[in-house]
């Protein structure tokens, strides 16, 4: 590992430590039993097999949206509709599972493909708007998220709602469900799809021509234009693919043993969590599983803490926010970086003189 | 429904829906004029909505929440404290992006996360509940009744009896217009937004100017947030900003980031919201109606951007 990379890792570790420290301080302020809360938060996930399994379960959706956002952000397309794509992916997977009767092996594949296509259509809207009208994809994608949320609730209530529940769909048939891998846990085969997506995402971005073009546009759009790269193609491909992956993730999550019915009437927030995954993974899909594992650990811990003590789960949002801030703040530890670069230069100079 | 549209109540409903968006649009304009896309508006509004409830309850504790002068005093304390905190939040955001050099969009996402989680935690700590602030006796912004004008038919009912903050939001358009176009600081803000390096070359400290712009932006956003929980509704509910900060970004950009332009677009979005409110009386599914404000924004943004692009291309051709 070279110095620059090592510096990035050190910086990230510091950012995470500071974020945790701030969270602990907040816990001390709001809780009657702060020590117990912190112990639950940090060690909770290791307390039982089920808790540990929870970590891996909640990592899966984060890998999908994280990879999707990595691809879109690599092309500097700040499309935040991954949230909506994930949501609609879940909806479409549920609708397909309920309305299209297929044999066990085929059904999940069809449901997931439809979910992914729905996600791609959703994130393509800001892309097409940008190409045709030069409207900023940022604002339009934010609006798309709200439209997607209400659209999904509309379809749920009008077409697939089980009157017995009032606000959830009919039970997803077993033929469409993704099987659980281990007895007593809900870790499901979606974890393989997630890891595959992360690896394929990496190969796409770093080992293909279009992936290279995409990153060039992300680094410097003017330069890319002068070197003959089709900007329109990059805008479209990056966002189609990003939404495809996020939609696939929504489908996988819904067909997993975690959900028996489609009942998402509020935003789940995986699209927003994807931002921190992408930040920690430095836009490289290959690192998203690690970032997702970290975040999943934190959230499982927080969930255990909120059940056992008086601290609410929402504290992780603050932890996440502080991590994002410190990781993206260029000035954070920059003095240390300068020192390190200077030392490296001096050493190189010495070596040169010696030879 | 047509009867509903041609009524005084409908005009009032437009003004009610426009007020929070208008404040946020002004907040977005002043930041955009200084060259910063303030996506943190959403979080700023949400935080202020909760602070508004807490601070006005604090004021109520001192002055009482009865009608008349004591209500006004309680509201005044709550409002001023909220706006003060709003300014501080604006400064913190400015510190993150100007001093720490964090990307403005990612920093805004972080701030919005803090707002979304932090308001729920704070609400939980104060009331023991996570959903809404029913338990807190907050004091709403007073309504302004104007004697004499009150008795004019139709017009009287529109001009009189409006929330004080609605008037303040309209006033903020005039103030922001004068500030940006008629004062030295306004000129500096626009210069920095137009070309940072050029502004610095004539001795303007871009950082200082952007700090000021974001502080003002935070204060305006907090007024919008205060209105949400102390005018539009009479309590805080979780995630009650509901994308209004983002809609304001669109409104501001569609108004070319000018206060007057932003005002006109805000009214348009206010109408969309008011129509949506009215349609809830019909048999159209509620979920489709809820989509209207966001769809209107999306379509409006598309149409505006298209026209702007065409105009720019025509200009390039004629040169």
Image (cartoon, rainbow, N blue to C red):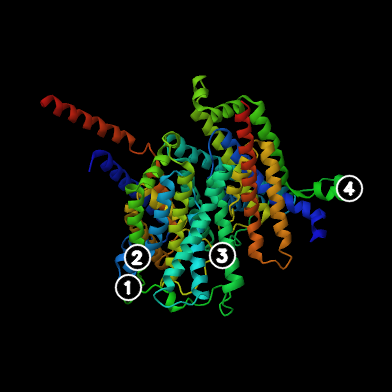
Q: Mark 2 lies on which chain?
A: A
| Separation of residues labelled 3 and 4 (CA atoms) | 47 Å
Badge 2 marks a residue whose secondary structure is helix
Judge by depth and name the residue closer to the eye, A206 or A69. A206
Task: Tell me, yes or no, whether dots 2 and 4 are on the same chain.
Answer: no
Q: Do the residues labelled 2 and 3 touch (CB within 8 Å)?
A: no
Q: Mark 2 points at which residue?
A: A191
Q: Mark 4 points at which residue?
A: B152
| Separation of residues labelled 2 and 1 (CA atoms) | 10 Å
Looking at the picture, how far across and down is residue A305, in whole percent? 39, 64
Position above or below: A329 against A115? above
Which one is earlier in the sequence, the residue at label 2 or at label 3?
Answer: 3
Q: Do the residues labelled 3 and 4 touch (CB within 8 Å)?
A: no
Judge by depth and name the residue closer to the eye, B21 or A282. A282
Q: Mark 3 points at which residue?
A: A152
| Separation of residues labelled 2 and 4 (CA atoms) | 69 Å
Badge 3 marks a residue whose secondary structure is helix
Which one is earlier in the sequence, the residue at label 1 or at label 3?
Answer: 3
Which one is earlier in the sequence, the residue at label 2 or at label 1?
Answer: 1
Q: Which chain carries label 1?
A: A
Judge by depth and name the residue closer to the eye, A172 or A55. A172
Question: Neighbour class for label 4 at 10 Å: few (<14), some, many (≥20)?
Answer: few
Quadrant housing residue B232: bottom right
Q: Mark 3 lies on which chain?
A: A
What is the total number of numbered labels drawn onto the structure image? Answer: 4
Badge 4 marks a residue whose secondary structure is loop
Looking at the picture, how far across and down is residue B207, in whole percent? 49, 30
Badge 1 marks a residue whose secondary structure is loop
In this view, the mark in front (3 or 4): 3
In this view, the mark in front (2 or 4): 2
Q: Name the residue under label 1.
A: A181
């Amino acid at each position: 590992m070279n110095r620059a990379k090592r510096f990035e890792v050190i910086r990230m570790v510091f950012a995470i430590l500071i974020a945790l420290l701030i969270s602990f301080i907040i816990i001390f302020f709001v809780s009657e039993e702060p020590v117990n809360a912190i112990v639950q938060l940090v060690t909770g996930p290791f307390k039982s097999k089920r808790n540990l399994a929870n970590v891996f379960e909640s990592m899966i959706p984060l890998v999908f949206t994280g990879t999707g956002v990595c691809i879109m952000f690599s092309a500097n397309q700040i499309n935040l509709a991954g949230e909506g794509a994930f949501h609609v992916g879940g909806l479409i997977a549920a609708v397909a599972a309920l309305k299209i009767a297929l044999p066990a092996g085929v059904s999940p594949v069809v449901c997931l493909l439809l979910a992914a296509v729905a996600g791609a259509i959703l994130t393509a809207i800001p892309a097409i708007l940008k190409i045709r009208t030069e409207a900023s994809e940022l604002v339009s994608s934010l609006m798309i998220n709200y439209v997607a949320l209400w659209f999904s609730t509309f379809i749920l209530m009008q077409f697939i709602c089980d009157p017995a529940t009032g606000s959830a769909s009919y039970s997803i048939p077993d033929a469409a469900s993704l099987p659980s891998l281990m007895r007593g846990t809900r870790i499901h085969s979606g974890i393989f799809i997630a890891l595959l997506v992360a690896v394929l995402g990496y190969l796409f971005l770093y080992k293909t021509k279009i992936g290279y073009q995409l990153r060039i546009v992300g680094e410097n759009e003017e330069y890319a234009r002068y070197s003959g790269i089709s900007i329109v193609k990059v805008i479209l491909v990056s966002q189609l693919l990003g939404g495809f992956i996020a939609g696939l993730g929504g489908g996988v999550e819904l067909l997993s043993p975690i959900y028996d019915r489609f009942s998402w009437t509020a935003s789940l927030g995986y699209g927003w969590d994807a931002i921190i995954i992408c930040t920690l993974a430095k836009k490289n899909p290959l690192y998203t599983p690690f970032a997702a594992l970290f975040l999943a650990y934190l959230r499982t811990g927080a969930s255990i803490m909120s059940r056992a003590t008086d601290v609410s789960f929402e504290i992780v949002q603050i932890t996440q926010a502080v991590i994002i801030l410190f990781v993206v703040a260029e000035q954070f530890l920059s003095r240390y970086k300068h020192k390190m670069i200077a030392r490296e230069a001096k050493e190189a100079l010495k070596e040169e003189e010696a030879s | 429904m047509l009867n509903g549209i041609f009524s005084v109540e409908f005009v009032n409903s437009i003004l009610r829906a426009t007020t929070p968006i208008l404040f946020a649009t002004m907040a977005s304009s002043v930041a955009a004029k200084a060259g910063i896309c303030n996506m943190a508006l959403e979080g700023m509004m949400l935080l202020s909505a909760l602070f508004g409830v807490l601070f006005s309850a604090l004021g109520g504790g001192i002055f009482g929440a009865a009608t008349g002068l004591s209500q006004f005093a309680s509201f005044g304390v709550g409002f001023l404290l909220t706006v003060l905190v709003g300014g501080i939040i604006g400064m913190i955001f400015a510190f993150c992006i100007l001093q720490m050099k964090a990307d403005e969009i990612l920093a805004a996402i972080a701030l919005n996360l803090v707002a979304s989680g932090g308001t729920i935690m704070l609400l939980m700590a104060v009331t023991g509940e996570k959903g809404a602030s029913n338990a807190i006796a907050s004091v709403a912004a007073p309504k302004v009744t104007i004697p004499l004008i009150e008795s004019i038919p139709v017009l009287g009912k529109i001009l009189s009896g409006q929330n004080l903050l609605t008037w303040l939001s309209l006033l903020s358009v005039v103030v922001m217009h004068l500030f940006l176009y008629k004062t030295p600081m306004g000129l500096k803000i626009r210069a920095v937004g137009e070309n940072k390096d050029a502004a610095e070359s004539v001795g303007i400290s871009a950082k200082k100017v952007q700090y000021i712009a974001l502080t003002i932006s935070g204060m305006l956003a907090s007024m919008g947030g205060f209105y949400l929980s102390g005018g539009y509704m009479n309590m805080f509910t979780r995630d009650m900003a509901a994308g209004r900060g983002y809609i304001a970004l669109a409104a501001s950009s569609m108004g070319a980031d000018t206060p007057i332009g932003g005002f006109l677009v805000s009214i348009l979005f206010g109408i969309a919201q008011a129509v949506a409110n009215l349609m809830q009386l019909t048999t159209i599914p509620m979920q489709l109606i809820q989509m209207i404000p966001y769809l209107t924004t999306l379509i409006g943004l598309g149409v505006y951007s298209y026209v702007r692009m065409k105009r720019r291309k025509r200009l390039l051709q004629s040169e």
